[in-house]
Amino acid sequence: MNKNTQPEEQAPIAGLHELDLSQLPQRDLWPEIATRLQPRQRRSLPGWIGYAAAASVLLGVSFMLLSDPQSLRLEQPATSEFAAAARPQGAMMAWAPPESTALVKANLHIVRDAESQLRHALEQAPESKSLQRQLQRMQGQRQSLHKLMQQADPQPGKPPAETGA
Amino acid sequence: MLKVFVMTAALVTCLPVWAEGTVINERRPLNMDARLAVKNLAGLIEVKAWDRAEVQLSGRLGVDVEKLEIKGDARDLLIEVRYPQKMRGGVDDTDLHLMVPAGVSLDLEAVSADLRVSGVRGDLKAASVSGDLKLDVSSTRINASSVSGSVDLSSAASDVQLTSVSGDLRAKGLRGMLKAETVSGDVEIAGGPFTSVSAETVSGDVALALSLGEAAELSAETLSGHLSLRLPQAPDARLIMKTFSGDLSNRFDRSGDEDRRRYDRKLGNGKGSIKLNSFSGDIEVGPDASPGRR
């Protein structure tokens, strides 16, 4: 049936074209083939490379600790997760009187002004990590005040968020 | 005619009561180690501790309050002053006075209401936008924040975070770990021994009068504020002070050969770390002349 169907293709084995490929073998040939196959080699790195990598990391960390013990400390760990938890403050802002909203707005100006002062200072001392950190903190403050402002002026018809015990 | 007269008389009689708002007096069972959240927009939240397993709530609701909601159980209770959906103009003050078991964890939230807490020893979270916070507690962990209100804390707490935008932050008696951050408010801290202190302002002054534990880490930063650190004795720490245009002074070191913009010395055994940074503000380190105020 498949005989000479693709004469333009060159057969990988001489004389293969001449065989009747539609004819099924009379017995199961696979067990015999399987025994002749070489087990496949896993392509893995030699075991010593893993040990060498681990040793390098250990040496590197030890060196950093010995040369500067503070290098691995986190910047300003200060307080625990509890104390650092973000304040949920805000849902009540939907009821806030205009003077409270105006006050938040005024503080937003203070933060923006602080940001601009920090940017100006950074132009003069661009390497200062302290100023960069402070600027980042002001950006966070600005975002949280913006959030308060948004909660103070929710979309029409949208009640303040429900709170639960 | 008589009907109109009676109705008018009744209205006139009721008017003062209506104008003063509703008097409240509620009690609920509350476990000694329960969690209690209180939310009040304007007026006052005052919390005092007692040794009973219940909360007593008294005070007066503002005239525009929709309802006082109390929900939850003896383990976890919420008290919230709620207002109508559409509010216009000013808000009448609501004063809440609470007596609570000393061990409860408190979560207090306000907008313009002041917060006053005394005597409790459970965890404390207190936040207000423009209200002032006055906290005199035995809690171990405290998180107090405001936008423009001031925070006054008196406690031996060992894990504290204080935050504001323009409000001043003042704390005494603290120890352990402290983080204080403000934008234009002043920071004034007295206490110790601390293991970790971080204080940051942009334009506010920082005044620290404290003692440090062994290998403690202290960091204080400001853009234009004045930074002052008072210690009972010369610290066992590496002291680094940096400024761009301010002045540096360390009265523990009289060598006199210091750089005007950067100071980096190992003092004592040098185990601890003190980092003080300013851009244009002055930095001053010296002995605490008044240790009694801690």
Image (cartoon, coloured by chain):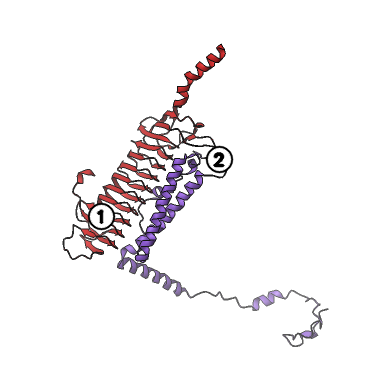
Chain colours: A purple, B red
Q: Which mark is residue B165?
A: none
Do we see residue A132 in this rendering? no
| Amino acid type, mark 1 | Glu
> What residue sits 48% from the left and 42% below the top?
A93
Q: Amino acid at mark 2?
A: Pro
User: In which quadrant of the rendered view does residue B51 lie?
Assistant: top left
Q: Using the image as rendered, state which of residue A69 and residue A32 is in the foreground.
A: A69
Q: Position of residue A66 (x, y in %)?
A: 30, 67
Graded by Cα atoms within 10 Å as few (under 14), some (14 to 19) or many (20 or more), the crowding at tag 1 reads some
Q: Is residue B167 above or below residue B264?
A: above
Left or right: B285, with B68 as reference point: left
SS at mark 1? strand
Asked whether residue A144 appears in the rendered view, the answer is yes
Q: Give left or right: position of B260 versus A32.
A: left
Separation (CA) of disc 1 from disc 2: 52 Å
Residue B193 position in % (x across, y down): 26, 49
> Residue A87, how many percent across, how many down?
44, 46
Above or below residue B35? Residue B196 is below
Task: Return the residue at label 1.
Answer: B214
For mark 2, give the secondary structure.
Answer: loop
Circle 2 residues within 10 Å: few <14, some 14–19, many ≥20: some
Which quarter of the figure is the N terminus of chain B placed in?
top right
The chain ID associated with circle 1 is: B
Name the residue nearer the viewer: B249 or B239.
B249
Residue drawn 31% across the image and 49% down it: B187
What residue did someone put label 2 on?
A159
